[in-house]
């Protein structure tokens, strides 16, 4: 009920009434402009990333400057409102030539979430379970009716990639604005950057997830000044912010993205490393000496440390899973808590009943990566598109081993996973149509040759 009251208070506040007016205008504009529709989706995904850090020592995090504090305070209601706007646009969209709008992997993930919600409803807080399943169902339905149906050609694919990149740009822009007034408010957790998210690890996943989209535009841009240079500078800011999170998970995800993206393209990989090295060693010290000088030495120590901060949690998760194999551990309290591993977390929470469909989700993701890799080799003109999806999906799967973001019901990390799956499904469906057309043309030619010969 607190969430409902918060949503109503937002809608009938001066900011809410002004937002409704803007929303009506944006809806009318989005009906005629696909880019505006995708931008609304980006704003929704960014709003889903807003959160407040709280633990046993911090009841209320330091305040942000106007209007970021107001946005963060109303992050979830704002995200819901934007989600509804995207859903309305999606309901007015046409199917086009496509028939597969939800990959099989997403259906398995829906199964996992349904099992978790049923357990919470039966043994915990039924109201929370109902609200969670409603929100998650809205997310899936919105993506199916909206973004998935908006991807009908290469332009739609490009706009889908652009929408994910925009979340990264919005995130670094608003946090750069905050840093101009009070840097401590977004780095107060052990000197690590968390920005407008609720945790440095949430910021890590957001920043890591958008990297493949920036590399896509760097390689795809034909113009240097307003193309490659802009996207290279933007990616540099993303990587710098990622470094400030102090997360080794983020480092592994970033490396995975880069290696997957430039697989079998050693020349481009070396060029990427050289450009990054020049920026870090030459450009930043020359034009922004305070940037590198302000880096907390604790971050360096954290990256160089060989300690495993998650082994204890993983061992506890494994013990809980193995001792409650079928249905998971009994529910204590009204909700389920998830540890630092998506796969073990669902095993603990729902046993094999939840782990099996999540394993099938993982298998479907790997199958998509393999099939897209095959398409990239067979059709070099789509190597860039397939590399983007492989890079994004691969890095998020790696990150899911250290964070339980696959089990969220409305977070940016979940939206990123779903979007990469939707982009990949478009490429697979498009390839199937092309292959069927080529085979039909070949069969017609064979019939014609047979007719002429006889």
Image: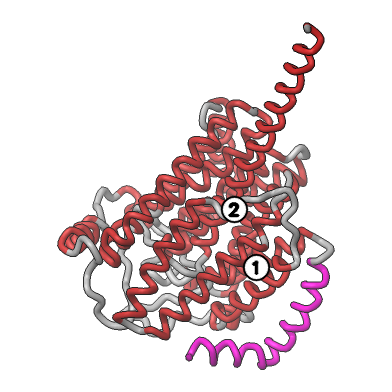
Left or right of 196, for residue 345: left
**Magenta segment boundaries in residue numbering:** 1-30
Which residue reaches farthest top? 453
x, y percent for residue 396: 46, 51
Q: Please say whether residue 237 is visible from this viewpoint.
A: yes
Q: Main secondary structure of the magenta part?
A: helix
The residue lying at 46 percent from left, 76 percent from top is: 132
Q: Is residue 3 magenta?
A: yes
Q: Quadrant of residue 347?
A: bottom left
Q: State which tag comes first along the sequence, 1 or 2.
A: 1
Give yes or no for residue 11 being in the magenta stretch: yes
Residue with the mark numbered 1: 43
For disc 1, the neighbor class at 10 Å (few under 14, some 14 to 19, many from 20) is many
Colour style of the rendered protein structure:
secondary structure
Please name the residue that numbered disc 2 is placed on: 288
Residue 286 visible somewhere in the drawing: no
User: Is 260 rendered above or below residue 331?
Assistant: above
Q: At 42% from the left edge and 62% from the top edge, which residue is drawn? A: 111
Per the image, label 2 sits on a secondary structure element best described as loop
Quarter holding the C terminus is top right
Q: Please name the residue shown 42% across and 49% down the image.
A: 397
């Amino acid at each position: 009920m607190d969430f409902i009251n918060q949503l109503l208070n937002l809608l009938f506040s001066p900011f809410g009434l002004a937002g409704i007016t803007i929303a009506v205008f944006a809806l009318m504009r989005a009906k005629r402009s696909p880019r505006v529709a995708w931008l609304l989706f980006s704003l929704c995904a960014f709003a889903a990333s807003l959160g407040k850090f709280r633990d046993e020592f911090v009841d209320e995090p330091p305040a942000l400057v106007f209007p970021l504090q107001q946005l963060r305070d109303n992050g979830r209601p704002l995200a819901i409102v934007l989600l509804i706007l995207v859903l309305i646009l999606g309901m007015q969209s046409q199917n086009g030539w496509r028939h597969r709008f939800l990959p099989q992997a997403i259906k398995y993930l829906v199964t996992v979430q349904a099992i978790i919600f049923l357990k919470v409803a039966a043994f915990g807080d039924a109201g929370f379970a109902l609200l969670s399943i409603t929100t998650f169902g809205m997310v899936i339905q919105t993506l199916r009716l909206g973004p998935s149906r908006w991807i009908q050609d290469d332009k739609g694919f490009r706009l889908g990639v652009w929408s994910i990149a925009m979340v990264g740009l919005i995130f670094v822009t608003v946090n750069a604005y905050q840093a101009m007034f009070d840097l401590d408010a977004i780095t107060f957790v052990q000197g690590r950057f968390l920005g407008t998210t609720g945790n440095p690890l949430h910021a890590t996943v957001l920043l890591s997830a958008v990297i493949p989209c920036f590399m896509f535009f760097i390689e795809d841009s034909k113009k240097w000044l307003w193309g490659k240079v802009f996207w290279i500078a933007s990616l540099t800011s993303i990587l710098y912010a990622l470094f400030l999170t102090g997360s080794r998970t983020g480092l592994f995800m970033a490396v995975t993205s880069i290696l997957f993206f430039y697989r079998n393209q050693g020349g481009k990989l070396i060029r990427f490393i050289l450009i990054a090295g020049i920026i870090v060693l030459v450009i930043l010290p020359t034009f922004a000496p305070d940037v590198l000088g302000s880096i907390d030495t604790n971050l360096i120590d954290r990256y160089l440390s060989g300690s495993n901060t998650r082994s204890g949690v993983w061992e506890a998760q494994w013990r809980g899973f193995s001792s409650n194999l079928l249905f998971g551990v009994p529910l204590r309290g009204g909700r389920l808590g998830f540890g630092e591993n998506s796969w073990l977390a669902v095993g603990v929470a729902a046993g094999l009943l939840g782990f099996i469909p999540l394993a099938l989700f993982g298998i479907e993701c790997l199958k998509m990566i393999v099939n897209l890799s095959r398409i990239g080799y067979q059709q070099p003109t789509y190597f860039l598109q397939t590399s983007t999806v492989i890079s994004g999906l691969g890095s998020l799967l790696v990150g899911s081993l250290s964070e339980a973001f696959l089990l969220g019901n409305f977070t940016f990390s979940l939206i990123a996973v779903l979007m990469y799956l939707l982009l990949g499904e478009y490429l697979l469906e498009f390839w199937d149509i092309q292959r069927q057309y080529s085979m039909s043309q070949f069969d017609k030619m064979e019939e014609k040759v047979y007719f002429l010969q006889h």
